Amino acid sequence: MNLLLAAVIVGLCCGRAQAKVYETQQQALAASFPNAAIARKTLFLTAEQAAAIEKLARVKVDSKVVTYYVARDKSGAASVAFFDRGLVRTMPMTYAVVVKSSGEIERVEVLSFDEPDDYFPPPRWLQLYRARVLDDDLAVGRGMPRISGASLTSQAVNDGVRRALATFAVALKGSL
């Protein structure tokens, strides 16, 4: 009986041993917005805004409370950072999506990834989001290539990017 209990504990511990933190939220903000004033904001979506975001993103809105960060550089140009956490297969991934005031993506970074390394999205693939906007081509298998062996990861990232861009377009664009 003790041997069985030990095996279960080792199994649970080893299952979580895959979790890796690549960057903290503060590190991601510092890397995205060097020498910029950063303000944390909270957005409370109305039912209409949530519905509009879902329609535009073609992805479900999980929460009507959205925390985001606005950064202004010395010239006054603003960018917005969204941090999101979603499931890949059965384990979570945390990522950041930085959007310029024009609605273009500036950066997409994975901060933590609990799935096995085999499913991690390559940095080169994440860089393909740079300067992209929310359109029909912002889809895996269309304008974004599939990741061989990590199709669920690529879809999870793309869904989050689409949700961030739609949230920006519906609730923030023009108000920065």
Image (spheres, grey):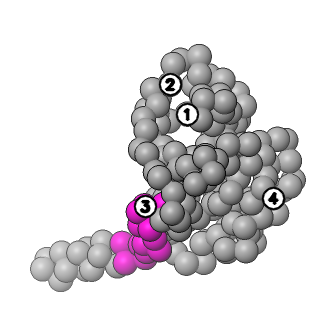
Q: Are marks 1 and 2 in contact (CB under 8 Å)?
A: yes
Mark number displayed over residue 25:
3
Q: Position of residue 138 (x, y in %)?
A: 80, 49
Per the model, the C-alpha gap separating discs 4 and 3 is: 25 Å
Query: Neighbour class for label 4 at 10 Å: few (<14), some, many (≥20)?
Result: some
The residue carrying pointer 3 sits among few (fewer than 14), some (14 to 19) or many (20 or more) residues within 10 Å by Cα, namely: some
Judging by the rendered image, the residue that carries numbered circle 2 is: 45
The residue that label 1 is drawn on is: 61
Q: What is the secondary structure assignment of the residue under circle 2?
A: loop
Question: Reading the chain from its start, which is encountered first: label 2 or label 3?
Answer: 3
Vertical order, 112 against 69 (above or below): below
Report the mark closest to the observer, 4 or 3. 3
Amino acid type of the residue tagged 3 in the rendering:
Gln
Q: Is residue 35 magenta?
A: no
In screen coordinates, is 135 left or right of 61? right
Structural distance between the alpha carbons of marks 1 and 2 = 10 Å
